[in-house]
Image: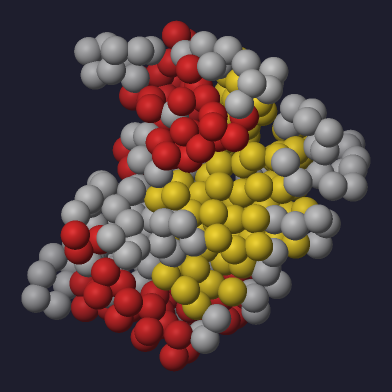
Amino acid sequence: MSLRIRFYGVRGSHPVPGPTTLRFGGNTSCVEVRADGKIIILDAGTGIIPLGKKIVRENGNQKEMLITLIFSHTHHDHTQGFPFFQPAYMPKCKLFMFGPRTFLEDLESTLEHAMISPFFPVQLREMPALKTIRSIDSSQVIIVPPGGRAPELHNLHHDEFDIPRGAVVIRCLQSKAHPNGVMIYRIEQDGKSLVYATDVEGYVGGDTRLIEFAREADLLIHDAQYEIDEYVGINGIPHQSWGHSTPQMAVEVARKANVGRLVLFHHDPDHDDEKILQMEKEARREFPKTIAAYEGLEITL
């Protein structure tokens, strides 16, 4: 059994189509994880639009498709592709969506507000897919069982549950290192693991909670939006407390957590291909098994 990770959107803030972003791509955050037929999607930026079309083509005339969609948070660049996600318009699709609350508002209400008239012509409840939407926190774990069964949400401290062989286990870590908070995820199946830590900001000495959460993971996907000069504001606006990291912050987490590989993610929309290549090269000096995420990048664990 294996986890296959494919990147469909790697940008932060807003899409950036054009000739200077062809190598890394201009779509906002979306990562697909395939686990023996199970489809798990991390975030619904504009990258989810081509992913949705691909899923529909693959599905063909099958009677049913089951998709687990997980949101790190509901800022626009992580949700803006969802209204154009083709499977959500198909009655045969069972769509299970999980994500954190925003203040006291649950995930379903937040998504509803993003699609309300007059801002979008189709409301969330009008999408024909069978949707199950659940707000989650760090005390819960998502189990995606084998055999095409629906995902299960369990409370770590109160529920008794078994993890069947072949199931995907998704653990959560809520972080305040981003405005309004963000959820970090660790996805595991039969000894393979990846951590998705977008929209996080590093601390001096490293984020100890994230380092422990990512301990010994095979793959760490980590925010790396700003260069150091941009972060501290040399010749420009400082970006401290904006909720994003530098490649050096990502490397520090990767080294201290002893992860297998590091993917730099959530590229700044003002960074062209050459700038990202430079940032990747600098990060590799400190952590050789580093790659800057690009659309179409596929990693198998």
In the visual, does 255 lie left or right of 239?
Answer: right
Q: Position of residue 121 (x, y in %)?
A: 29, 12
The residue at 59%/35% (across/down) is: 58
Q: The C terminus appears in which quarter of the rendering? A: bottom right
Q: Nearer the viewer, residue 177 or 132?
A: 132
In this view, 89 is above or below 285: above
Q: Position of residue 286 (x, y in %)?
A: 47, 89
Q: Is residue 227 above or below residue 242?
A: below
Q: Quadrant of the N terminus?
A: bottom right
The quadrant where residue 63 appears: top right
Taking depth in this image into account, of 266 and 51 the one nearest to the observer is 51
Question: For this rendering, which residue is in front, 184 or 274?
Answer: 274
Viewed as shown, does residue 36 lie left or right of 232?
right
**Residue 220 is at least partly visible in this image:** yes
Task: List x then y, in percent, for residue 65.
Answer: 65, 26
Instruction: Identify the residue at the far top of this view.
Output: 126
- Residue 215: quarter of image: bottom right
Q: Is residue 298 above or below residue 131?
A: below
On the picture, is 263 further left or further right than 162? left
Residue at 37% across, 84% down: 281
